[in-house]
Amino acid sequence: MKRKGVVILVLVLCITLTACGSGHRKNEVKVLSSATDYVGQRYETVIAELEQAGFSNIHANEVDDLTSDSSMIDGEVSEVSIDGNTNFIAETVFAPNSEVIVTYHIVKKINAPLSSTDIVNADIVEVGRLFEEAGFTNVEIGEVYDLDPDTFEGEFENKASINDQTSFSTEDTFAFDAKISIVCHRPYEKYDVTLKVECVGNWFFDKYDIDISIDGVKQATLDHGESDTYAYRVKEGAHTFTLSSADNVSIKQDITLDVYCNLEASYKITCHSDKVDVEELYMDRDELLSPNQVKIQFNRSEFVFKDYHDVEKTLKDYGFTNIKTVPVYDIIFGITSPGETDNVTINGIDTYRRGDVLEKDAEIVITYHMREEDDPANQPGSPPVSDNPSATTPSVTENPDEPVSYSTNTQEQAKKGNTGVFAYKKSGSSYDQYYIIDFDEGYVYYFTDGNGSETCERLKIDEGDLNSVIIVTYHDGGTIWQNGLHFKWKNQPETLILEDSDHFEYEFRTTNLNSALSLRNSKTIKDY
């Protein structure tokens, strides 16, 4: 009986001791780190560790006092207290419900001095100053020209953001180093651009329409062989105008225009199977000139055949001050009127174009035709003028009712360019080239003289007249191509232009018809 009582007593004592030990763990927790270990850590990390240890009464004490001069970083812990104890060490035991205060610091918060709507119409410099005075240290102001003046009314519109937040009020607070962006948006400059585009019509091949695009966006389509004018308003800066085949966008040509004022440009385009050729005829910019400058509003062709007195007056009216007139005594049979302008050069060239800007004192030389008999060198007492046997001068009668020397037509009939027979010649250093255009038979003859060739090409006139264009087609085996022939200037038969299949131009002058026919008749005719 005594042994059984002893065993029962031991069991009771064990149960009692075990119960006492278990109660201690439920009512006490050990802190895992010392107070000094927590200082300098992120507050989220410290709170997470204390919660894991078993503390249930944790408070975060946020202090927004960090500035650009502070050594601490945002969210850094400066102190941890447990029931007021700030000097505890690791493994110290506390009650689970002990008051734990984690003090950490964040950047200083500031109220916005203006709302986002207040800023829209305010002075941008003043807005920036108010934000800086409020204590914000990362303030950026800027100005951009990105508003379309055709749709935006007003001088400007401000847009602001704080850390990319575009809507805010004066009650909203932000960190002192928040990114403040204030941008003044203003209308950009916009200019009128006028494009005059002429598409040279092909007769049979490569007859596609032309798409016109600006910066990759299609604007219009020009029918093949037509001309049209297009007006656009574009933003200041460089723009790419693209002229491309409406059938194949890879066949194209880009034109880069630097637009800084209103301008008008003219282009002639030619279609090929693999490319679009673009020739700039003129570029006329509406820009401010200096008092000593003149803008050209003409091309050379506008003066040729006019009386040189009228040409001289026109140039003076434009403002040019250094004009010289030079006679050329080359009228023999009277087809050309005395005083008729032959050429006008500016600073030695005649390739100027409308829109070119020159100095008022640029040297202008007007050459004009006069009768050979009026040449002072041919007057009595003057040395004789030597003949040039290689020069070919049309033998033109002064009688308007009789045929001219280069045609079976009278002078007035020849101007029409659609009847009779014409003869033209292009003189070369080693051989000469001839064209005989026979409307009566409906053929064009081409041959050379001086290079040993014994053949003459004969081609059927497909259509047209010399005031527009005569089209002839070559058929050589499986190869087909076309040439065009026309007067250089309308109703002026003295000069013929050959435009080949690649649209290169060659100039021929009238020559004696009888001599040309005699040479042709000595050749073997070859039909194409």
Image: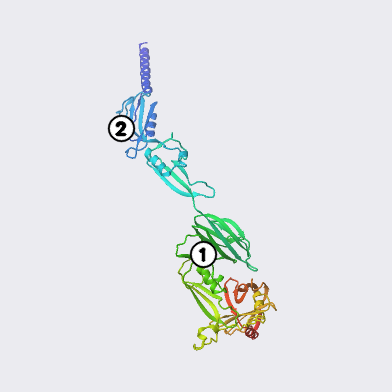
Nearer-the-camera pick, 508 or 309: 309
Task: State if disc 1 and disc 2 touch (CB < 8 Å).
Answer: no
x, y percent for residue 126: 41, 42
Which three-letter amino acid code belongs to the residue tagged 1? Answer: Gly
Q: Is residue 477 visible in this depiction of the protein? A: no
Q: Nearer the viewer, residue 427 or 354?
A: 354
Q: Which residue corresponds to the image point at 50% horizontal and 57% vertical from the top-left?
A: 261
Residue 37 quadrant: top left
State which quadrant residue 407 falls in.
Answer: bottom right
Figure check: 165 above or below 334: above
Q: In the image shown, does 515 or 180 lie closer to the viewer?
A: 515
Q: Which residue is mark 2?
A: 36
In the rendered image, which residue does mark 1 sit on? 355
Colour mode of the rendering:
rainbow
Q: Secondary structure at mark 2?
A: helix
Q: Position of residue 202 (x, y in %)?
A: 63, 68
SS label for mark 1: loop
For marks 2 and 1 on the same chain, the one whose residue lies earlier in the sequence: 2
The quarter of the picture where the C terminus appears is bottom right
* Quadrant into which the N terminus falls: top left
**Mark 2 Cα shell of 10 Å, populated few (<14), some (14-19), many (≥20):** some
Nearer to us in this view, 161 or 191: 191
